[in-house]
Amino acid sequence: MTNKVSKEWFMQMPWGKVAMISWGESSKPPILMVHGYMDTAATFTRLLEHMPDTYYYVSFDFPGHGKSEYLPVAPPSTQTLLVEVVRRIVDHMGWESFIFLAHSMAFVIGLCYNNAFPGRIERMIAIDPTIPLSAHYNVSHNFQWWFKFNYQYYYDSYHKNYKNMKNASKLYTYEQAVAAMMKARSLTREQDDIPIGHYAYDLLHLVT
């Protein structure tokens, strides 16, 4: 495990609490570590063992992930909302500039944030970056298919899905969930306890 001193706290957002975690000393240059679609801030724990002590590392759980509270039941959240989460965190930390370390979906969030607030991100490190939803249209050039794929199915099934969510109980025990993730991601039990991005170690040299 990393020897860097860690701290956990919650930040209040208009919809609920967002779980925060940091490693290292706040007086050092900051790196914001942002997780992907199916992960949490814990994704970076193993990576921190190999990161230099010359930076201050901060991460968080997006709404509905990890220890953060869920959004109210409503239409699906957009990537714009996730950019707003990042904005509030950066402003809360009082950073004028920072390094953005992104895994998967967070790469898109970082691009959107940088477009909205140019100059705040000094450098971006992308681990296994994904593409934005809009890229589906750029590939297909079929707006009708793109809209149906991303939105229409959700709204057509909204009441059915909402009813299922209200009546649903936990479908998996902890051990069953661990086994499912181990199978889906080809992980050992030790790796599964604290997931990590596939290509994290290949990018360490970017901040050393």
Image: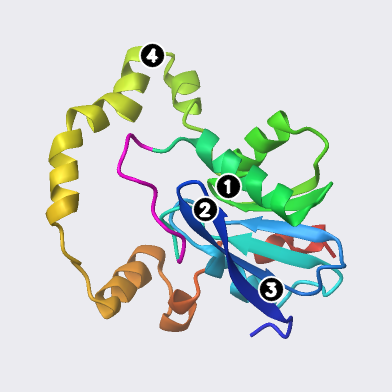
Q: Secondary structure at mark 1?
A: helix
Q: Position of residue 148 (x, y in %)?
A: 29, 22
User: Which mark's residue is nearer the viewer, 4 or 1?
Assistant: 1
Discs 4, 1 touching: Cβ within 8 Å: no
Kindly tell me whether residue 1 is visible in this rendering: yes
- Mark 1 is surrounded, within 10 Å at the Cα level, by few (under 14), some (14 to 19) or many (20 or more) other residues, namely many
The three-letter amino acid code for the residue at tag 4 is Asn
User: Which mark's residue is nearer the viewer, 4 or 2?
Assistant: 2
Q: Which residue is mark 3?
A: 48
Q: Which residue is mark 2?
A: 36
Work out whether residue 193 or residue 14 is closer to the camera in this orientation and state it. 14
Tag 2 or tag 4, which sits nearer the N-term? 2
Name which residue lies at 80% across and 47% down.
123
Magenta segment boundaries in residue numbering: 67-76
Query: Could you tell me how far apart the alpha carbons at marks 1 and 2 are, in whole angstroms?
Result: 5 Å
Q: Which residue is mark 1?
A: 106
Discs 1, 3 touching: Cβ within 8 Å: no
Discs 1, 2 touching: Cβ within 8 Å: yes
Discs 3, 2 touching: Cβ within 8 Å: no
Q: Secondary structure at mark 4?
A: loop
Q: Position of residue 68 (x, y in %)?
A: 46, 61
Q: Secondary structure at mark 2?
A: loop
The three-letter amino acid code for the residue at tag 1 is Ala
The three-letter amino acid code for the residue at tag 3 is Leu
Q: Is residue 47 left or right of residue 188?
A: right
Name which residue lies at 35% across and 63% down.
184
Q: Which residue is mark 4?
A: 142
- The quadrant of the image that shows the C terminus is bottom right
Name which residue lies at 29% across and 77% down.
174
